[in-house]
Image (cartoon, rainbow, N blue to C red):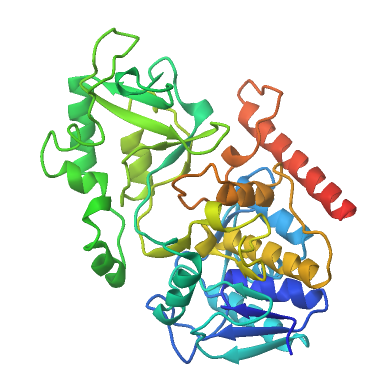
Amino acid sequence: MSAVTVVGAGMAGCEAAWAAAQAGLSVTLYEMKPVKFSPAHHSPDFAELVCSNSLKASRIDSAAGLLKEEMRRLGSLLVPCAEACAVEAGGALAVDREQFSRLVTEKIRSHEKITVVNEEITEIPSGQVIIATGPLTSDALHAPIAALTGKSLYFYDAAAPIVTGESIDLDRAFYASRYGKGTADYLNCPMTKEEYLAFHEALIHAESAPLHDFEQEALRVYEGCMPVEVLAKRGEDAIRYGMMKPVGLTDPHTGKRPYAVVQLRKENREGTLWNLVGFQTNLRWGEQKRVFSMIPGLEHAEFVRYGVMHRNSFLDSPRLLDPTYALRKEPRIRFAGQMTGVEGYMESAGSGILAGLNTVRAVNGEPPLILPRETMLGALTAYITDPYQENLQPMGANMGILPMPAEKFRGKDGKQRKYQAYADRALAALDAALAAS
């Protein structure tokens, strides 16, 4: 009998199974391929890279590079496999996707503690279990997960961009709530008529990102989450009477009501991240940077997450999961990967490592491993499991989710020195946490 069952052999499931097996637990890993494929998957191998073959930057003073270094120190399977299959990609770690998946599959299948079963799971297994079935969880398993979690398995089809608070120009933007009601919780970016018309023109002519056929079909159902660029094409004033309406607001810089306004809402408790309210979008990322930087106050905004639109089932993790990725009401069940609200290949894999390691600790009766907020994995975990999050938007690794240092880094190389300081602090905190555990 297995000590732990892992469902799904994607990035997160492979890391979870590997972490548990390396610690000596017997693992049964269920993967429905090649018996059944999701609409986006084609290879029978594990850890299939569906979209890009890039795992992002390698530099430790980048968010993606720091994440991978933390994973390496936690015993990652995928990081060394990726390095063994690397192709030239400048400062990024990109892989030969077929070779990468094949190598991961070989490692998993040859591990003496892992038994692979190619079968679709339609019920949540008994005992210690990690569910890592990704954003395209099959309908058969989707139903019992939704029944277990209540109405908390969202169909996520669009999200707005997120920028760092420190990159917003407060000489243009201002804090206020409409009609002065409550506290001034929103940042408002006011526009003149000329600024609005130029922005509207750029928005309706910007290039959109392509969608898969199955995503296009799904999105036709969700009129309430319309991309801002689609709404803008319905008329010159469509968005000015929608998410950009200026009523109840006075620009303190002019003493007048703006012609239009973009509101930003806190994305985390500390206010280091802000999202553009109502600006869910399917524009290409480069177009988002170009067009949204036309918004007064966001001319030099640092985008830590661009707006996205695709099919993605995910949990209401702030209400459901604890920092070990376990269900609060039934902690024998853990989740990992994109369905928890982390976004990205390596972010999903990192959550799998933590789910696997904490399952080991639960089986052995040991205290859980909860990483410090100063680490990238710890910050990501804290972000998606923080009950403060009322409307969770999936999040990838970025420096904006880390606690800000007391020191101010100025000058031309200030940003680089700050990010290096973040990385040094994170790795020191991770090493200290592992030494104490």
Q: Nearer the viewer, residue 254 or 108?
A: 254
Query: Where residue 9 appears, x then y in whole percent?
Result: 58, 78
In the displayed structure, 24 sits above or below 207; it is: below
Query: Where residue 272 appears, x then y in whole percent?
Result: 55, 32
The answer to whether residue 361 shows anywhere in this view is yes
Give the residue drawn at x 54%, y 41%: 388
Asked which quadrant contains residue 425, the reply is top right
Give the residue drawn at x 75%, y 60%: 72
Query: In the current view of this chain or complex, which residue is farthest to the left?
Result: 235
Query: Where residue 323 appears, x then y in whole percent?
Result: 66, 54
Query: In the current view of this chain or complex, which residue is farthest to the right?
Result: 435
The answer to whether residue 294 shows anywhere in this view is no
Instruction: Pick the quarter of the image with the C terminus.
Output: bottom right
Q: Nearer the viewer, residue 137 or 78?
A: 137
Give the residue drawn at x 40%, y 78%: 139
In the displayed structure, 295 sits above or below 170; it is: below
Instruction: Pick the quarter of the image with the N terminus.
Output: bottom right
In the displayed structure, 88 sits above or below 204; it is: below
Q: Nearer the viewer, residue 361 or 30?
A: 361
Query: Where residue 13 appears, x then y in whole percent?
Result: 61, 73
